[in-house]
Amino acid sequence: MSARLEICNAAVPNARRGSSRVLGQHRCPKTRPARKGAPHTPGWPSGPGATRFLSVSVQVGARRRIPDEAPPFSAFLTDTFGRRHRYLRISLTEKCNLRCQYCMPEDGVKLTPRGQLLTTEEVLTLARLFVSEGVQKIRLTGGEPLIRPDILDIVAELRKLEGLKTIAVTTNGVNLARLLPGLKRAGLDLLNVSLDSLVPSRFEFIVRRKGFHKVMEGIEKAIEMGYNPVKVNCVVMRGLNEDELLDFVALTEKKPLEVRFIEYMPFDGNKWNFKKMVSYQEMLDRIRQQWPGLEPVPGEEADTAKTFKVPGFRGQVGFITSMSDHFCGSCNRLRVTADGNLKVCLFGNAEVSLRDCLRSGATDEELLQIIGAAVGRKKKQHAGMFSISQMKNRPMILIGG
């Protein structure tokens, strides 16, 4: 291999190609001809094709032990706090057919030129690389992922990846009823549908567009096609929709839904302030006044939602408590934006351009070096709601949620 050095934007705050936010450059590391895996570290497996791995340990009482045949996990996707990142969220587009108040600034956003967005092959190349290192779940987001014309092809190709257990989509639901049969055939496992009001006029006020009945049709179609549960994401905002909490919970009585109430989060242009945020505890108390028997549902360690169920109801409810009770300690998520930047934290403003490295001819090893360095810099937790509200970050629509 030649001694060339690849130039990519990496590990700098807000590194978006074509904007004033590109603050620096990073040189992809050299690779050695005899190696195809990661560089050898004493104590780790080595040799041609070897990759650094971490063994999975399990808790037994007060002691930790390494199972004799524990599956390995890549050190490139393990941060300095031991968090293993098995979940990748890929934004397929910055465009959306709605204009939700909490997601997009009222005056819109400057979209990245099409040539600077990830192509289908680049999306799949990155997905293959992350899955080969241990990612087990990929969620496709946006913008609105279902307006991307190659969405069915992307899902079908992801389905072929050995080791990928779950393919999920988060959608606003407007195009869902029409596309869901094809998505299911392609291999889509899980669905999250955004719905912030059950009142059509209020829905239109929040999203600044029509489409309520199409969203409801999409949810019904998902239930009809056997998705269980269908997750419904509701961003709760004081003065807008907090009075609908009980109506949303009532939806779970006879339908296999998991309604997820999301605390209002600060992002560029969404006019967040503390008074608009309805905390998890306030929501929970209000729901328990109506259903005192509401009981917690056990979840996985890396779950973002605190989940509850009304006894006898078919579905359940969850709370995403990013602001009032963060879950950073068990975070296993990484994000790739539509323009190819890696974000290791939703609320952090440091980004690494994987797109630039791909287009400069970087090898898998070079990409993994960049990814591993970014993951290694992931902080223990976000800075808190007040600091986040003052921090320069992308609008939600340019991140992908």
Image (tube, rainbow, N blue to C red):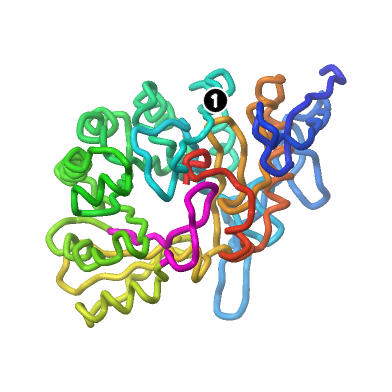
Report the side of 215 relative to 352 (left or right): left
Please provide percent x and percent y for residue 159.
40, 32
Q: Closest to the observer: 23 or 273?
A: 273
- Disc 1 crowd rating (10 Å Cα; few below 14, some 14-19, many 20+) is many
Q: Residue at x 49, y 37 (%)?
A: 90
Q: Residue furthest right?
A: 3
Report the side of 106 relative to 307 (left or right): right
Is residue 292 shown above or below 165? below
Q: Closest to the observer: 398 or 320?
A: 398
Is residue 170 shown above or below 274? above
Q: Residue at x 47, y 47 (%)?
A: 401
Q: Residue furthest left?
A: 254
Please provide percent x and percent y for residue 255.
15, 56
Please provide percent x and percent y for residue 71.
57, 51
Q: Closest to the observer: 136 or 372?
A: 372
Instruction: Assign a secondary structure to mark 1.
Output: loop
Q: Residue at x 69, y 37 (%)?
A: 21
Asked if the magenta segment contains residue 218, the reply would be: no
Which range is magenta? 259-277
Q: Residue furthest front?
A: 107
Callout count: 1
Image quarter (top left, top right, bottom left or bottom right) of the N terminus: top right
Please provide percent x and percent y for residue 201.
20, 48
Q: Closest to the observer: 260 or 102?
A: 102
Report the side of 240 relative to 311 (left or right): right
Please name the residue that numbered disc 1 is placed on.
Answer: 118
- Quadrant housing residue 219: top left
Visible residue check, residue 376:
yes
